[in-house]
Amino acid sequence: MFVEGGWKPSWEPPRKPRLTKRQESVLLWIIGANLLLLLVAPIGGATVFHALLAMMRQG
């Protein structure tokens, strides 16, 4: 009854091209850096917070 990939309505917007290999690589590096920061930032933040508390107790 229907043919796949046959007729398409003229009002359908054109599809955007997929990411290039370079864009995909950059996106993966950004995601990896964000995941690393999710693990490191709380530890670093806790260290700074403890250092500030130690400085306030000494004074």
Image: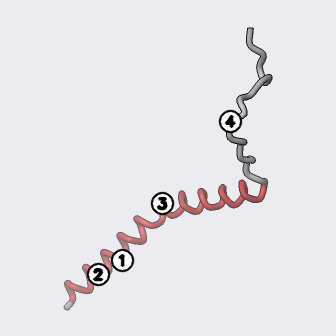
Residue 45 is drawn in which quadrant? bottom left
Q: Residue at x 71, y 46 (%)?
A: 16
Question: Which of 13/57 is in front?
Answer: 13
Which of label 4 and label 1 is nearer to you?
4
Mark 4 nearby-residue class (10 Å; few <14, some 14–19, many ≥20) = few
- Asked if residue 51 is positioned above or below residue 11 in the image, the reply reads below
Whichever of callouts 3 and 2 sits on the residue coming sooner in the sequence is 3
The Cα–Cα distance between marks 3 and 4, rounded to whole angstroms, is 44 Å
Residue matched to label 3: 39
Whichever of callouts 1 and 3 sits on the residue coming sooner in the sequence is 3
- Position of residue 37 in the picture relative to residue 50 (left or right): right
Q: Amino acid at mark 2?
A: Leu
Q: Amino acid at mark 3?
A: Leu
Q: Secondary structure at mark 3?
A: helix
Whichever of callouts 3 and 4 sits on the residue coming sooner in the sequence is 4
Q: Secondary structure at mark 1?
A: helix
The Cα–Cα distance between marks 3 and 2, rounded to whole angstroms, is 21 Å
Question: Which of 14/21 is in front?
Answer: 14
- Asked if residue 7 is positioned above or below residue 17 in the image, the reply reads above
Question: Which of 2/41 is in front?
Answer: 2
Residue matched to label 2: 52
